[in-house]
Amino acid sequence: MSFAANHPRHRNDAKVMSRADLTARLVARLHHEEAVIGGIGYANFDLWGAGHRPQNFYMLGSMGLAVPIALGVAIAQPARRVVALEGDGSVLMQLGALATVAGLRPANLVIVIWDNGAYQITGGQPTAAAAAADLVAIARGAGIAQSAWAADESDFEEMIARALTEDGPWLIGCRIDAVKPVATTERDPARIRDRFMRGIAVGG
Ligand SMILES: Cc1ncc(C[n+]2csc(CCOP(=O)(O)OP(=O)(O)O)c2C)c(N)n1
């Protein structure tokens, strides 16, 4: 049975959930120093809000880099699970990364897309996901076979549990509401980089 079989067939059939809540549920399941890359936009705010971990990296400046950065870490450290958290606007800006992931097939990579149909942090302008694009279908078409929408919170937790233990790459699409994060990521890129490198035991 394929990964997608028990999950919503289309974006609009998935429950609209809270990014902060799902991020907290994800972080609560991390017990093996998994690396987590929070993309630009509100993905990294809610990652910060879930409690800083030494293995967290917060992408502050450029859209679409959570997946490429996570892919690099996953290739460099195959024994570590690596999770990319990215908004739909950012994924749309860097769609080619999905095809690269599919081609390289890192077994330890998990991609979570927070799809609120908007560039929320810059004012809520609608993305192509709000119009018609189904990012999970795009990911599957790119070749990431284990791509699916989370039906609801418990489905998300089951998918994460599986993605953290079984061979990937995995891509989990989540429909997200327009609630703003309560936390603001500490904006010090050099510290973010240095702490992350120490957190994943790279460099001094
Ligand atoms: C290449 C580039 N274009 C535009 C911006 C400005 N910008 C920063 S975040 C953002 C929206 C991000 O949207 P999304 O990834 O969906 O995350 P959300 O804000 O919804 O959490 C935009 C347009 C940027 N930082 N980089």
Image (tube, grey):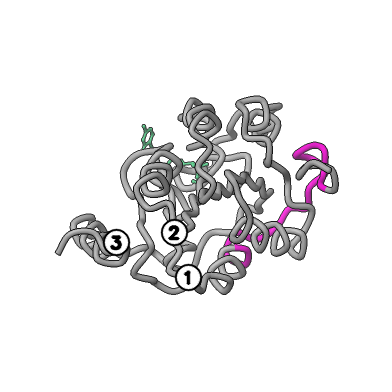
Q: Which region shows up in magenta?
A: 7-22
Task: Tell me whether circle 3 and circle 2 mark residues in contact (CB < 8 Å).
Answer: no
Q: Which residue is mark 1?
A: 32
Image location (x, y in percent) of residue 83 = 50, 54
Viewport quadrant of the N terminus = top right
Dot 2 or dot 1, earlier in sequence: 1
Above or below residue 93? Residue 46 is below
The answer to whether the beta carbon of the residue marked 1 is less than 8 Å from any atom of ligand 1 is no
Residue mark closest to the camera, 3 vs 1: 1
Q: Which residue is mark 3?
A: 196
Give the amino acid at mark 3.
Phe
- Does the magenta portion include 203? no
Dot 3 or dot 2, earlier in sequence: 2
Residue mark closest to the camera, 3 vs 2: 2
Give the amino acid at mark 2.
Arg
Q: Is residue 81 left or right of residue 62?
A: right
Question: How far apart are labels 2 and 1 at the CA level?
Answer: 8 Å
- Does the magenta portion include 13? yes
Give the amino acid at mark 1.
His
The answer to whether the beta carbon of the residue marked 2 is less than 8 Å from any atom of ligand 1 is no
Q: Residue at x 34, y 39 (%)?
A: 62
Task: Tell me whether circle 3 and circle 1 mark residues in contact (CB < 8 Å).
Answer: no
> Splitting the image into 4 quarters, where does residue 191 fall?
bottom left
Question: How far apart are labels 3 and 1 at the CA level?
Answer: 15 Å
Q: Which residue is mark 2?
A: 80
Secondary element at tag 3: helix
Crowd around label 1: few <14 · some 14–19 · many ≥20 (10 Å):
few
Image location (x, y in percent) of residue 183 = 44, 68
> Splitting the image into 4 quarters, where does residue 4 fall?
top right
